[in-house]
Image (cartoon, coloured by chain):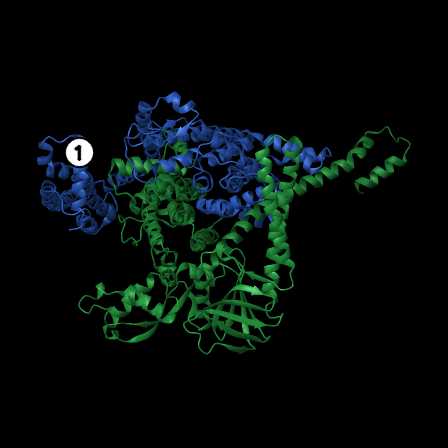
Amino acid sequence: MSCVDIVSIMSNSDYTGRRAINTVYAGLDRRYAAERRFRRYGMLAVLSGLAFLVIMFTSIILNGYSAFRQHYVQLAVEYDESRIDRDDPAASDFEGIVKGAMRGMFPWMSERKDKKRLYGLVSGDAAYAIRGRIAGNPSLTGEKEDLWVLLDDDADMFFKGYVTPVDRRPMSSRIELAFDGERAILTGDEAAFEGIVKAVREELQRQLAVAERELKNTGRLLEEIEAGATDSDEIVRLRSRLESLQERVSDFEARAFSADLNEEIGAGVSSYLVNVNGVYIWINAVTTTGVTGEVFAQNTKGLPGVFDQWQLVTLEVPPADRRLSDKEVSILLSLQDQGRVESRFNSVFFTAGDSREPEQSGILGALKGSMYMLVVTLLLSFPVGVAAAVYLEEFAPQNQWTDFIEVNINNLAAVPSVVFGLLGLAVFINFFGLPRSAPLVGGLVLTLMTLPTIIISGRAALKSIPPSIREAALGIGASKVQTVFYHVLPLALPGMLTGTIIGMAQALGESAPLLMIGMVAFIVDVPQGFTDPATALPVQIYLWADSPERAFVERTSAAIMVLLGFLITMNALAVVLRKRFERRW
Amino acid sequence: MQPTTLIAVLLALSAYAFYIGRRKAFRVSGNDIRVLRSLPSHYGYYAAIWCGIPALIIFSLWSMIDGRIILTMATSSIAASGVSPQEMSLVYSEVLRFVSGSTIGGKPDPLIAEAVVEYRKLQDISNAALIVIVLSVAITGAAFALGKIHKDQRARNFVEAGIMAFLIACSTIAIFTTLGIVLSVLFESIRFFQKVPFLDFIFGLEWSPQTAIRSDQVGSTGAFGAIPLFAGTLLISLIAMAVAAPIGLMSAIYLAEYASARVRSYAKPLLEILAGIPTVVYGFFAALVVAPFFRDAGDLIGLDVSSESALAAGLVMGIMVIPFVSSLSDDVIAAVPQALRDGALGLGATQSETVRRVVIPAALPGIVGGLLLAVSRAIGETMIVVMAAGLSANLTANPLEAVTTVTVQIVTLLVGDQEFDSAKTLAAFALGLMLFLTTLTLNIIALHVVRRYREHYE
C-alpha cells in the first residue's frame, strides 16, 4: 500500500483536518519536489564535472591532432657547382641552392620584397636537408633532382586550413582574357563574376551603413549645439564635416546600387583569384561584366583567348587579417596544383629538440629530459620510500618521534610544489653547487615531492598483509628482519609498485618546481646525460604555450596529448597491477 | 677513471667479497652450516658491507668537497694578490667556465689561464688519489671482515643492525626535507627583511619589485608591499572554491547517496581523472579557451573583461580542485554511520531531507576539513595562474580584472638570471615563506579536524 493510498483513506475518514497526517500530506508535494530538485542538482554537479573533462579533452584534441602531420614541398633543386665548396662542403651555400630552386620555379617573383617572401615559404630546414644530401652523395654536384623539403610553418598552416578558408569553384561560363599592358582583362557574362560582384556590393552597403550612422550622429550633435548656439567654431567644423559625410553617403549609395559597378577590391575584403590554365590571375577591380587583375606568372604569351573551363578561387579571410599575402597563397596553390605539396607524418616532432621555428621543433629533447629525471626519481624514491614505509609500519615503536615523522610526511604531501622548487634552488643549486637546468637536480626535487605518496601507499600496502603471515614466519624461527624481508615485503610489493607508478605519474606532470631550478631555458640540443641542460615535457608545454605562432598552439596541444598518453598508460598500468595482484586475505 | 666506473668497480668488489665471505662461512663450518651462528649468506653480506660502505662514504664525501678545495688551491695565487671576495667569486666562475671547455668570450686572461692549468693538474691528482684511497679502503675492509669470519661470529645481528640503520635513515628524510624547506626559505627571508622592513612587506599596498640598475633612476627602490598579492591569491582561490565547493560536494552526495553502483563505478574514476591531469594542461586550457571565451562573452554584453581575468584562472582552478573536494567529502559521507540515515528515513524524512538535516551536519567537520585542504591546494597552485593570470599587482576585488598571485610572483622573480643579494630575488623567498606557513597552517588544521571527526565515529 503506497503512501498516497493511506492518505486517501485517511482523508475520507471523519478525522479530516485534525490528524497530523494531514499536515504531512499538505507538505508532501513540496517535499517531493524538493527531493527531485536536490537529486537533479546532484546529477547536474556530476555531469558538469564530466562536461569540463570532455570540453578540455575535445578542445585539446581539436587543436592538436593536425600537428601530427606536416606538409612538405618538392623542390626542383640544382646542385650548382659554383655554390658547392668541394674542399669544405660545410662552407657551401646551401641556402643559395634552396633560393635558386624557388626562384627557378617562380621567376615572376622578381622584386626584392617578393623574393624575400618567396624564400620564406620554405623552412630553414631545407638547407640542412640539402647539406645532408650532398654529404651523403658528393657526386650529385652539378646535377639536378627533385627533393622533398619542409615547408615553413605559415605555409603548413595554410594547407591545414588555419590561415583562410579557400573556396575553389570550377566555373563553366565562357570568359575572354585580354591584356592591356600588364593588366589582364577578363570579360564574361553576368553569371561569371556574380559572386565577386555580390560580395563587393555587400561591402559597399556595409560601408554605406557605417557612413549613414555617422551622418545621423553628427546631425544630431549639430542640432544640439545649434540649439545652445554658443560655440561658433565648433558649429562651422561640424557643418563642414556633415557636408563631407553627406557626400560620402551619396557616393556609396550611387556605387552600391549602380547598374554598372566599377570598384577596386581593397585589403579589407576577401581576395579573389581566377585560375586559367593553371595560371593565377589576382583580381583587383571588378565591373558587372568583367574583372581586371594582375597575372601571377612569368610570361603571358599564349594566355589571351577564350576559356570555357576556369576556376574562381576565393580566399575568405581578407589579406589584412592573415600572415600570408595573396601572392604567397597563389604560389602555394600552384605548388599544390603541380602535385608538389604532400602531407606526411610529422616525424620531426618526435625526433627534434626545441626550436624557434615551429616546423623544426620537436619534443624529443623534452621527452629525454623527463626520462632522465624520472630515472633519478625512481632510483631514489622507490628504495627510500619502501624503506621508510617498512620502518614506520613494521619496526617503529609508537612514540613521539614516530608521530613527528608521520606528521611531517602528511604535511609534505600537501606542501605546494613551488615551495619544493625554492628548496631545490636554495639547497641543491646554491648550497651544493649542482648544475642548473640539469635533470639530476630536477630528479632530486621530484624525489622529495613523490616520497610522501610512495611512503603513504607503501604503508597502506603493508597494513593489508594479515598478521598471520608474520606470526607464521616468526613461529618457525625467522628474525623480525627476515620476516619482513622474506615474507611481508614480497606480498606487499605489488601494492607498493602501484603507489610508486602513481607517484611517478605525478612527477612526470609536475612543472612548477622545475621552473625554479632553471629547466625553462631554451635548449635546442637533446640532452645526453643526467647533468646536461635539459627541459621536461610539461615545461616544454609551458614554453610553447607562450609562443604566439598558430603552429606552436598546435604543437603545444600535441605535446599535451603525448604527455596525457604517458600518464594514462602509467595509471592504466597501476590499475592492471592492482587488479592482477590484489589479494583478499 | 670515471666516477661511475669507480662505483661499478666498487660494487663488483663488494659482490666478490659477498661470494668469498659466504664460501669462507661454509669452510669454517666444515660444510655443516648448522654449527654456524648465522646463515652463510649473512657472512657474505657482512663482508660486502665492510667492503662497500666505508669506501662509498669516503667517495661521496670526497666528491662533495674536492671541487671547492681544488678551486681554492688553484686560485690561491690570484687570491694572494689582494682581490676582494666579490671579485673572487667572479674569478671562480671564470675558471670553472674555462675548465669545462667553454670558449665563449675569447682566450682567458693569463692569470686565469694559469689557474685553469693548475686546476686541471690538481683535478687529475685528486682523481688518482681518490681511486687509490677508495679501492684500498674497500680491499682493507673486505680483508678485515673476511678475517673475522668464524663459526661463532654473529654476522646476522651485524647485518640486521645495518639494515635497521638504513631504514631509520630513510624514514628521517621527510624530517630533513621539511627542515630543508624551512631553513632555505627562512635564511633568504631574513636577508630580505634586513633590506625591506617586515611590516612594509606584510602591510604594504604597492608591489613593484623591479629595482633599477642605477640608484638615480625612477622607481629605483622598488616597492615590496605584498597586500595586492595576498588579495589576488585570495580572490582567485575564492572563485575556485565557489566553483569547486558546490560541484564537488553535490557530486559527492549524489555518488554516495543516490547513484547506482554502476553509475558510481564509472563516474567516480572519470571525475578523478581531473585530479590526474597536469596543472600545466589546465593552464594552457585556461589561457587558450576559457580566458578568450570570457573576454568575447564580455564584449557581447558590453563588459570590459581583461584577457587575463581572475575569473578565468579561478574557474579553471576550481575545475582542478573539484576531485579533491568530492573524494574527501565522499570519504567522510561514507563514514557517517548507516544507523543515522536509517533513523531519519524511519521518521519519514525524504532522502534529501536525510542528507541535508542528518548526514551533512554529521559529516560537517570532515567536509570543512576537506574544503580547507582544497583551499590550501588552490593557494599553492602555480602553473594555472602563471599561464592564465596577470603579472601586474592590482589591488581589486573585481573578478573581471587581471590580478596576480603569490605563486606567480615567486616564479617571475626567480625565472631567468638572478643575483642572490638583490631584494628582488630574496622577495621570492619571503613570499615562499608566507606561502609555506599559510598552507602548513591550513593543512595542520584540516588534518586535525578530519582526524578528530574520524575518531568520533570509529
Estimate the x, y position of residue A24 in percent, counting from the top left. 79, 32
Report the front residue among B135 and B66: B66
Q: Colour of chain A?
A: green
A491 vs A189: above or below: above
List the single residue furthest toward the right: A14
- Quadrant housing the C terminus of chain B: top right
Estimate the x, y position of residue A27 in percent, counting from the top left. 78, 33
- Which chain does tag 1 point to? B
Position of residue B352 in the picture relative to residue A529 (left or right): right
Q: Colour of chain B?
A: blue
From the image, tell me which residue sits under label 1. Answer: B87
Secondary element type, mark 1: helix
- Counting the numbered discs, the total is 1
Estimate the x, y position of residue B57 in percent, counting from the top left. 20, 40
On the question of residue A335 being in view, the answer is yes
Position of residue B290 in the picture relative to residue A371 (left or right): right
- Which amino acid type is marked by label 1? Glu
Report the front residue among A459 and A66: A66
